[in-house]
Image: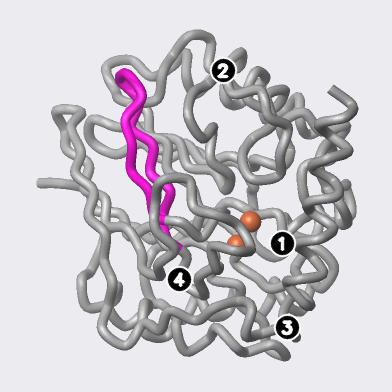
Amino acid sequence: MSFVVAQITDTHLALTKPFFRDNFAVAAAAIRASKPDLVINTGDVSVNGADLREDLVAAKGMHDALGLPWIAVPGNHDLGDTQETARKQPINDERRRRWLDVFGPDFWMRDVPGWRLLGINAMLLGSDLAAATEQEQFIAEAAAGLGQRQLALFLHKPLFVESPADDEVSGHTLTPRSRRILMAALGGITPRLVSCGHLHEYRERGFGDLHQIWAPATAFTISDWFIPTHGGEHIVGYVRLAFDVDGSFTSQLVQPEGLEPLDLADYPEAYGDLRQIKAAMDAQKSQLAAAK
Ligand SMILES: [Fe+2]
Ligand SMILES: [Fe+2]
């Protein structure tokens, strides 16, 4: 019998900015009906948990109301972004502590038949927080103690776009430095599956023995003019994963009826005017390129 995970991501929930709550309710109803063994949210659970505890509390309450076992890893909007690339709200101890208070651990491990599920805080990798070292040790121990199990890694940001050798420093994926730290902690173990969110783009692609899933967001899509796709699709949905005792797995995109492909550009109250944000992102990209 498989161990079934419903992976949701980028739910962007808040009490006072309720734009994406209906989509969460639609996904929640579909997930409840499908009775998975575990729900994993790969981050950006909240609109602005990085600054507002109340957003984290609201998002936590909505996950509890699922009535299913669930666990989450944080996203950049939940406890701040990667220090190397953050334009605002870098991860720090205060932001992280808020996440820990409301959601519990930001890195964790679950063993299921044939598999070890490892959830990590992508923004903590390579940060100046003392907990960054604790997380590296945790990853190293999880990888070293795998035994016959396969490793499935869950984190908010994609590992890379094309290959681990990508050298672009960007907020879209782990930075080369964060990726190196993660690989070193894994000690030569290649996860069989790495599943993430963050780009609001659905893509599945293999790289050698590694299968990478970029799960689609539950909350909203992003227009191509704002962030072009990387070979995937800007759609909404979630991913159903079935892990088997023999170390195999299957993945399936689920798009429940009633889940609306809301475009973030239509909700400037959520994160501001996307055209202005795009201009700032382009300027930062030029700066990073010039600094190379
Ligand atoms: Fe997101
Ligand atoms: Fe994100």
Camera-nearest residue between 280 and 58: 280
- Under mark 2, the amino acid is Ala
Looking at marks 3 and 4 on the same chain, the residue that comes earlier in the sequence is marked by 4
Q: Does any atom of ligand 1 lie closer than 8 Å to the CB of label 4?
A: no
Label 3 vs 2, first from the N-terminus: 2
Q: Earlier in the sequence, mark 2 or mark 1?
A: 1
The residue that mark 4 highlights is 218
- Residues at marks 1 and 4, CA–CA distance in whole angstroms: 15 Å
Q: Is residue 134 above or below residue 11?
A: above
Q: Are the two marked residues, 3 and 4, in contact with CB atoms closer than 8 angstroms?
A: no
What segment carries the magenta color?
202-216
Picture coordinates of residue 186 (x, y %)? 53, 17
The numbered disc on residue 142 is: none
Residues under labels 3 and 4: Cα distance? 18 Å
Q: Residue at x 82, y 69 (%)?
A: 276
Foreground tag (1 vs 3): 3
x 76%, y 24%: residue: 133
Residue 211 visible here? yes
Sequence-earlier tag: 1 or 3: 1
Q: Amino acid at mark 4?
A: Thr
Label 1 sits on a secondary structure element that is: helix
Q: Earlier in the sequence, mark 4 or mark 2?
A: 2
The image's mark for residue 165 is: 2
Q: Nearer the viewer, mark 2 or mark 1?
A: 2
What is the C-alpha distance between the residues marked 2 and 1?
27 Å
Checking the image for residue 268, the label placed there is 3
Decide: marks 3, 2 in contact (CB < 8 A)? no
Quarter of image, res 255: bottom left
Q: Is residue 197 left or right of residue 286?
A: left
Q: Residue at x 39, y 63 (%)?
A: 69
Give the quarter of the image for residue 48: bottom right
